[in-house]
Structure formats: C-alpha cells, structure tokens
Amino acid sequence: MRPHDSHGIRVLRNGTAVLCALLIYYGIPLELNLAGRALGSIVFLVAFAGLTRLIDRHVRRLTAAPRQAGRQVDGILLLLTVTIVFFALTYYLLARNDPAQFDGLETRTDALYYTIVTLGTVGYGDVRATGQAARIVTMLQIVFDLVVVGVLLAVATGTITRGLRDTSE
C-alpha cells in the first residue's frame, strides 16, 4: 500500500468515528432520570475518571513507541471526539435537570456548541455557565482539553521533527 493510500484510509476512519460519535450523541435516549444530584455527580466522576485513565494509557503507549506517532495521533483524535461527546452530554443533562446552571443552553446542539467553543477557548458569551456545578464541569473540561491538545501538539511536532530529520539524513 502506498503512503497516500494509508493516509486516505486514516482520514476515512477518523471521519467515520466522528460521524458515529455524533449519531450516538444525538440518538442516545436520555429519558433516564437519575435520582438526585449525588448519584448524577458520582456517575459523572466515575466516567471522568475512566476517560482520564484512557487518555493516560494512550499517552503512555505513545511515549513508549514514538516512531508510530502517526497512528497514535488517530487514537488521540478519537479520544478527543469521545471527550467532546462526553462533556456535551454532561452539559445537556446538567442544563436539562437544572435550567439555572446555564444561560442559553437548551438543546443538544447548544451543548455540543458550548463544548466545542470551550475546547477552542473562544467563549463567545452567548451560552454561559451560571451555576456552580456547570462552572466546575467547565473548568474540568478546560484543564482536560489543555492536556489532550498539548499531547496532540507534542506528538505532531515530534513526528514532523523526526520526519524532517530522517529526510535530511
């Protein structure tokens, strides 16, 4: 297989993963009514810890085999997609269960928009966290995103540097 063919397959695979994540995000039934805020908080914290563990394992594998960084970037992008869906669902459920937590967040699209705007650190101000729980989750997302994006940039930079060094030798 030629290098550009594998690149096309990787792009197709990543695009398919994003499409599947969006289908799950918009299609998942959320009519479950978790009893009380304590249970909802526990579920969030367990899911957040699991996501953090997945990222940690992936970063450890990446640092153990830096020559395979191109394939590792795909995994980081997939984890970033899962992270976006996770936080968007969390924001949507938080707003749905307590409308005072957000100003301007009413639909799943609003929650996805808010998540991506927060990831990009743009913060237009049209949707904003007003409740303490929403602010805490938003702060967790910002820190989490900084770590994931930082790792992604480090991998990409290392891959480019190695590629340039290999071609100049």
Image (cartoon, rainbow, N blue to C red):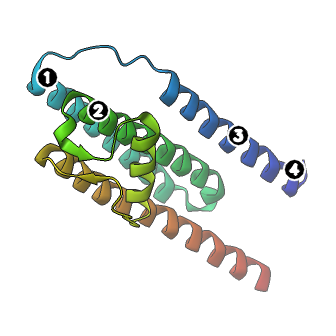
Determine crowd level at label 1: few under 14, some 14-19, many 20+ residues with C-alpha closer than 10 A.
few
Is any part of residue 70 visible from this angle?
A: yes
| First along the sequence among labels 1 and 2 | 1
The answer to whether 19 appears left or right of 30 in the picture is right
* Gap between marks 4 and 3 measured at Cα: 12 Å
Instruction: Choose mark 4 or mark 1, whichever is in front.
Output: 1
Q: Residue at x 90, y 47 (%)?
A: 1
Q: Which residue is mark 3?
A: 13
Q: Residue at x 14, y 15 (%)?
A: 35
Where's residue 134, x and y in %?
20, 46
Q: Which mark is residue 5?
A: 4
Instruction: Choose mark 1 or mark 2, whichever is in front.
Output: 1
User: In front here: 104 or 52?
Assistant: 104
Where's residue 61, x and y in %?
47, 50
Q: Which residue is mark 2?
A: 47
At label 4, the amino acid type is: Asp
Where's residue 74, x and y in %?
61, 49
Determine crowd level at label 2: few under 14, some 14-19, many 20+ residues with C-alpha closer than 10 A.
few
Q: Which residue is mark 1?
A: 39
| First along the sequence among labels 4 and 2 | 4
Is any part of residue 169 visible from this angle?
A: no
At label 3, the amino acid type is: Arg
Q: Is residue 83 above or below residue 21?
A: below
At label 1, the amino acid type is: Leu
Q: Is residue 165 above or below residue 85?
A: below
Q: Is disc 4 in contact with disc 3, using a CB cutoff of under 8 Å?
A: no
